Image (cartoon, rainbow, N blue to C red):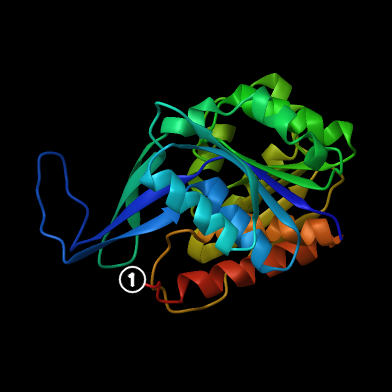
Amino acid sequence: MSQVIVFGSLHYDIIVHGPGRPRKGETVTGDRWFPKCGGKGGNQAISAAKTGVPTAMIGAVGDDDFGRVLVANQASGRVDSRFIRIVENVGSGMSVAIFDQDGDYGAVIVSGSNLALGQVDVDAASELFSRGGVLVLQNEIPDAANVAAARATRSAGGRVVLNAAPARDLSVDLMELVDVIVVNQIEAEQLTEGPVVDTLDGALDAARRLAQIYPVAVVTAGGEGVACATGEGLELAVPALKVKLVSTHGAGDEFTGVLAAELAKGSEIAVAINAANLAAATLVSTPQAN
């Protein structure tokens, strides 16, 4: 078993539940709200650590209450949090997520201290990177920071997993360093400039197109399932497990964290995808603490 290094975002989330998400200019009355530790990077680190794989989080928080809670949450989740840097005079990243009655949501993030991540954080964690393993990246931090972390991992013989969320143009430097790309339906549509991905077959078609660029491409399709294609010709289309939906929040991060952990264990991609699919299904069907 090797290690998982998550290099990425930490956000303090404010979760709001209401009858629906407001339209432009509309105010709706919600019924409850609560805080939650998040950020795609933070969520993925917690998810990977739950599998028992040694997991470290490299991130940046502000010198504020949000930041202190975020660091403590990683430590309580058995994540190595030694390399979370405190950035002076910048607020911690945060988000507001609004859920409707069906459990779907929309969110706004304010990146804050996450934008400070860069080569300095890679250098500070050189002892981690020297051991290789599986590196997990997202698009909530600067592209240059992702490139620096990916280069350090590749130099040590490790693998790079990019959860390309939210979708944005990727530098050629980063694209050439990615071993596994993980995207959802919307991100797949944007990155491939292809047709709408609203079926499992559509997800597989998108994965095929991404596999022309990346060695392994994984496209999650919500309630339809997950598809995978590789540059070597392997194709998978795994239907979603039938569960009662409580909330979709964090499902993609749970999937990515468990996928990375399985790869760190040495699992083949098909085994890793099935384990991640099960973990995501369990999460979306389980009532959250608040």
Side of 264 relative to 7 (left or right): right
Whether 128 is drawn above or below 286: the answer is above
Callout 1 secondary element:
loop
For image coordinates 71% across by 31% down, the residue present is: 124
Measured as percent of width and height from the top left, residue 73 is found at 51, 58
For image coordinates 52% across by 48% down, the residue present is: 40
Based on the displayed image, in which of its 4 quarters is residue 29 positioned?
A: bottom left
Measured as percent of width and height from the top left, residue 61 is found at 48, 38
- Which residue is denoted by mark 1 in the rendering? 290
Based on the displayed image, in which of its 4 quarters is residue 45 positioned?
A: bottom right
Based on the displayed image, in which of its 4 quarters is residue 15 positioned?
A: bottom left
For image coordinates 73% across by 68% down, the residue present is: 52
Measured as percent of width and height from the top left, residue 26 is found at 10, 45
In the depicted view, which residue is nearer to us: 106 or 153? Answer: 153
- Examine the rendering and report whether any part of residue 52 can be seen: yes
> Which image quadrant: the C terminus?
bottom left
In the depicted view, which residue is nearer to us: 123 or 288? Answer: 123
Measured as percent of width and height from the top left, residue 58 is found at 63, 41
Number of dots carrying numbers: 1
Q: Dot 1: within a 10 Å radius of its alpha carbon, few (fewer than 14), some, or many (20 or more) residues? A: few
In the depicted view, which residue is nearer to us: 25 or 111? Answer: 111
- Examine the rendering and report whether any part of residue 200 can be seen: no
Q: What amino acid type is highlighted by mark number 1?
A: Asn
